[in-house]
Image (cartoon, grey):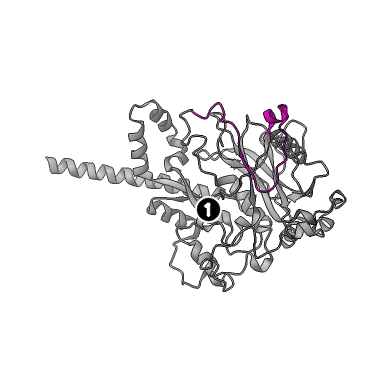
Amino acid sequence: MSLNSYSLKKYYSTKQNINYYNQQINNYYNPPISTNDILSQLTYHLNTLKFQKIQKDYTFKRASVAAIIRVVPQNINQINENWSKCNTIEKFLSQNWVSNGVCEILYIRRSLSPTDRWSGDLALPGGKANLGENDKETCERETMEEVGLDLRSQNFIFLGQLDQREIRSLASFKKLMVLCPHVYLQISPTTPPLHVNSDEIQSIHWVPLTFFMYDNFINNWKKVSYPAVKILYLLKWLKVLEQSSQYYYLWKRIEEFILGKVSYGGILLPSDTNSKVTNDNDSDNGNNESAEGSSTYLLSSPKHSNTSFLPFASQKKPLILWGITLGITSDLVDLLYKPEELPLLSIKELASARFSHKDLEFMVKCFKNGIPWKKSENYYSQIPCRKPVISEYIDDTKFFSHMKFSAYVGLLTRMIIAWFATKKIKELIR
């Protein structure tokens, strides 16, 4: 369900008679749920809920990413010197500094590159599998190569996996790869020194997990849009025509006028993250610092930062979490709630794609749900709490098929209207 038909305000005002939206914005460093409860719920769900597993098919590539969670101590005097002995989740949660700490998750911002499909986007550490590797080995190797964190060391413990998912091309919907998310917990009070691969990563960001819970992200909700014509595979020749034409911007405006845009929901990350980490060049010079607390670190501008194929310059592109990474984050956040507090809709449902043109959006809803008759105001408050998404894998194939079919029908309808209008104008001129 999109934000167009179901507002965030209604979403939170109908949850268990608690009007979260009308309250003052919660400080996500002091959430209404304890760190112990968050991690206990996460480990319980990961251990009890069966994740969606996609069998290996050697005709398609596989990739793995790591959702790395750490607890930042709020009082260093509470840190136990024997923390390394607390190598199980039960022992880890029994420590005082953990119960009073703040849970954070690590994101990376990919470097700008003309060969990278997700250039400049926020992502989780990880990458493609090598021959003979299993998914977990791929995750650990890629994380070590990208940010220098050894997930096999005593500083981390493996918690489990989230739903595996197929990554498909936007236009042709051709299957590109299978993505396998893994969840790790840092059990050390301080994060080991980070050695960032500046060829692949532009910056890193530790974000409080509670920022994505309750209503903390509402004021940071953004739209990520692109021309709707991009989802029409039969019109891929327009891209070549656009780039070769001196009237490039005129072509873009015509496309947007005819079919409009497709918009996804995204979350602008908080800006209060400002401590230092190091990259490989710094460590070679002897400047090796560990990352403590919430951190964001911008590396030097990559070699492709001034190229014209990207809509943003390297330092101007906003830190918006959307798409694949937002979907993984949504699945993870669902597992942090107690069953009675689980929101009516997941974050990725709120962020689902929608057309800017109302007639195309109406067609999608009709194909998906039948004719959308108006529902009563208290309809959504009567919906029982859903299960975490990890136990109910959702395949978006049909939804995007509805979107593509609606776009083709809309384009054909507009061509017919234009033909009739042209015919009438010629008759009037005569």
Whether the magenta-drawn stretch holds residue 287 is answered as yes
Quarter of the view holding residue 124: top right
Can you give x and y, in whole percent of width and height, for residue 112 in the image?
55, 32
> Three-letter amino acid code at disc 1?
Ala
Direction from residue 200 to residue 406 in the image, left or right:
left
Residue drawn 60% across the image and 34% down it: 299
Query: Does residue 256 appear anywhere in the picture?
Result: yes
Residue drawn 46% across the image and 36% down it: 311
Q: Majority secondary structure of the magenta segment?
A: loop
Magenta stretch bounds: 279-306
Q: Is 44 or 428 nearer to us in this picture?
A: 44
The correct choice, above or below, for 207 with respect to 335 in the image is: above
Which quarter of the figure is the C terminus placed in? Answer: top left
Can you give x and y, in whole percent of width and height, for residue 118 in the image?
56, 37
User: Would you name the residue on which mark 1 appears?
Assistant: 351
Residue drawn 66% across the image and 42% down it: 179
